[in-house]
Image (cartoon, helix red, strand yellow):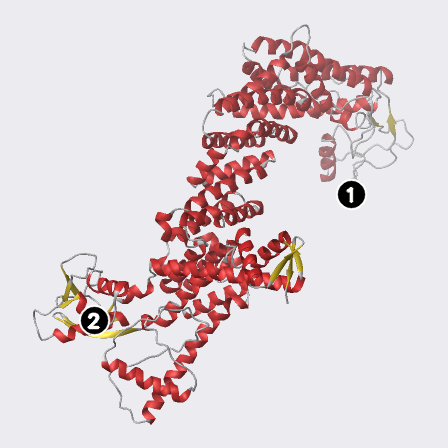
Amino acid sequence: MHSPASSPTDGPSPSFMIPSKRKSAGTIDSRPLQQSVPSPSDPHFKRPRFDSQPDQGAAKMSTVLSKRPEIVDLTKPPTAFQPHKGAKKLVIKNLRTTSQAADLARYYDATRRELDEALQAIFQQKQPRQPLERLYRGVEDLCRHGASKELYKTLQDRCEAHLKGDVRAAISAEAGSSNIDMLRTTYKHWVIWNAQSTTIRSVFSYLDRTFLLSSKDFQQINDMAITLFRRTVFVSFQGFNPGVKTLDGMCDLVDYDRRGDDRFDSTLLRDSISMLHVLNIYGKSFEPRILKASTQYYEEFAEEQSSASLKSYISSCEKLLSREDYRCNAYNFDSTTKRQMLVDAHQLLINNYSAKLLDGGSINKLLDENALESMKALYDLLLLGGIQKSLKCPWEEYIKEAGSTIVNDTSRGDEMVVRLLEFRRSLDLMIRDAFNRDDGFTYSMRQAFGSFINDKKGLAAWKTGTSKVGEMIAKYIDILLRGGLKTLPKSLLSDVKDRMDAEKSGQAATGDEDAELDRQLDQALELFRFIEGKDVFEAFYKQDLARRLLMGRSASADAERSMLAKLKNECGSNFTHNLEQMFKDQQVAREEMASYKSWCEGNGHTKSSLDLGVSILSAAAWPSYPDTQLSLPDDVATQIERFEAYYGNMHTGRRLNWKHSLAHCVVKARFNKGPKELLVSAYQAVVLTLFNQIESDPDGFLAYQQIADSSGLSGPDLDRTLQSLACGKTRVLTKHPKGRDVRQTDTFTVNKAFTDPKYRVKINQIQLKETKEENKETHERIAQDRQFECQAAIVRIMKSRKTMTHANLVAEVINQTKSRGAIEPSEIKKNIEKLIEKDYLEREAGAYTYLA
């Protein structure tokens, strides 16, 4: 048997006791056993008989005895085979020649030598001569013997001597002149030491798990190895301190990465950071250095980039912060380092240069270019610096300036609302995609829109005295309701994100044409809400609605009803009362015409080739139209007289006032290329039918004055009518001489060569267009109505208050009339004077008194 400190191949085994209490199963005491054999002198001895012929059993016994084993295992159960019979006597002899204490001492000394040799081999990066299991058992025996503290001290001294001697000398010899070389050398020896300490920890595992685990005075082996390496490399010794250059080398690597230097080694930086975390010197030694170096770099970067444009500066800062964030995450920087580094960057790059970032001229340029990415980057930068709210001021000023330019551009008045909506659309996209749907910027945008839309400069530019924006919004809605989405530029249509938002909010997908049209009406109403004087919009919307209803030009009846419901919800039932009455009149007119046809059949009137349609309108609900003289053809005049007779019988006490300027009809015409149906106004139809008088004369023509006398038209109405028939896109008449303007000396003939791909040709577009004179009259009527509303408000207020000072009365009048239209205090004062003259009020002791 062999002791734990020896091997069967190492020579004779020493004869000392084994100190371990471990026993192998199935063994007995190591002292040899002897078996006594009976001698011939024994009285019970029987000599065996020898026959001349040995029997088979004797031969078999002899064979068995000759193969008797040297060691008899008494632990095995007895077998049926028993070569000896009779009494057996065992004599146990002690072969020990030395004392037990001496054997133990020699064993422990040999174990210490083997451990010391193993440590030297590990430090030399060689495999120990003894197996690691045997070394582990030796450590266990020493610990059980009570030598744990001594063993730990020895291990600590050997490791410290190796690190301060061999490792420090190797680092000094291998390190080059640069900090990066020193870092690379230090990390190399750290890796070697890490592997060596792992092997040492496995050999001394029993010491680690027993004595050191419960000890408060001694570190465990892993902590001891880390502490010794830290003291060796990162603590100065006789003027040599590789740790400083190592840390500087790590800072140099970060600087290489920031400047795009090819010498940057990402793997070395990542592994070095991990080494500092293990050595527990990251926060104390490295973090202050890298933060100081980063601050210097940020200052240099900001100073260098500050001379560039705002767009370039924003892009550079965004890329820098993105790289800093990536580096901290990718190379295991501590979270506190990352947080402090970014805080310093925000302070130096953003807060210190806030004047540049918030420069109104530069921001206006970015907004003019619709630079979404740059504005998003700017917002994100300001958000990081906590000063994003400061962006609202230049944002609002830009909207006011750009909006005022659009509103006051008299050369592009027809495009005003489309440009405003495109402008609003770009701002909405900026808020959605760049400002992260910040409600503060939405509020600022609305404030700015309300400011420039109601600015008095617009009134001065257009010289109307009332809101031009209200008029143009009404006309834009008229275009939408007449032509649908095909009249809109693509920039105003919804995109994918708008459709997703609509679906999330439970609305119909804006991909549907009706839903998209409804959304465009909502966008127009957004502008309408900013207008203080809504009476202008009401007047022009009523005129346009009347034309659409009377001429059947609405693209969608559902859209008309939807728009009416929106206006009612926005402004109340008083605002839409007359508009609703207009729709009711249309329904009543259809019923009236059905009754008229039944009346004609019942009274025996023959069916005429002329199909007459009459719309009975309430004078109070519909816009007022001037009366004009028109000489109608005989068949038309006959039909009208018959309808008047019917209406007089059905509705006594009512009087019809015919408005021929709103009438339209279909005229059949014959040309050389075939017949056509011309959709024309009543004025145009009367003029065209005059040429039937000269149909038989190939060279026949009608002079301007002849047409005027026969039709009853004159002045601008006749000029516009002839211009639309002879000078427009569709020329069914020919003017002599040719030209775009109509003069009283011109003559006209039928254009027999007229052709058009469509059978029914529309020429009555002139009816849908408003003249400058009509526009001016509408604005003057609105201004006059405001004066009446102002006087009515004054009377209502004074009737309830009886007595008021001038300032209080003016303030109350403005408050009550602002929804219809803003009235200047000077105009209010004039109306007060008029009411005093009419004996509604009187002055008394600096105040106004109501006279009942």
> Closest to the observer: 344 or 792?
792
In the shown orientation, is residue 642 left or right of residue 850?
left
Q: Quadrant of the C terminus?
A: bottom right
Q: Position of residue 413 (x, y in %)?
A: 37, 51
Residue type beneath disc 1: Ala
Q: Earlier in the sequence, mark 2 or mark 1?
A: 1
- Provide the secondary structure element on which disc 2 rests: helix
* Residue behind mark 1: 80
- Tell me the SS state at disc 1: loop
The picture places residue 649, in percent across and down from the top left corner, at 39, 89
In the figure, is residue 24 to the left or right of 534? right
| Residue displayed at 64% across by 12% down | 167
Judge from the rendering whether residue 87 lies leftward or rightward of residue 169; answer left or right: right
Mark 2 → mark 1, Cα distance in angstroms: 157 Å
Q: Position of residue 8 (x, y in %)?
A: 70, 22
Count numbered badges in the picture. Answer: 2
Tell which of 609 and 433 is nearer to you. 609
Residues packed near mark 1 inside 10 Å, few (<14), some (14 to 19) or many (20 plus): few
Residue sitting at x 54%, y 59%: 834
Taking 287 as reference, is 379 above or below it?
Answer: below
* Residue 677 makes an appearance in the image: no
Q: What amino acid is labelled 2 in the image?
A: Asp
Q: Within the image, what quadrant is residue 223 found in?
A: top right
Query: On the image, which quarter does residue 550 sit in?
Result: bottom left
Q: What residue is shown with label 2?
A: 709
651 shown above or below 762: below
Are the residues flagged by discs 2 and 1 in contact, CB closer than 8 Å?
A: no
Residue 819 screen position, x and y as percent: 54, 58
Can residue 297 be seen here? The reply is yes
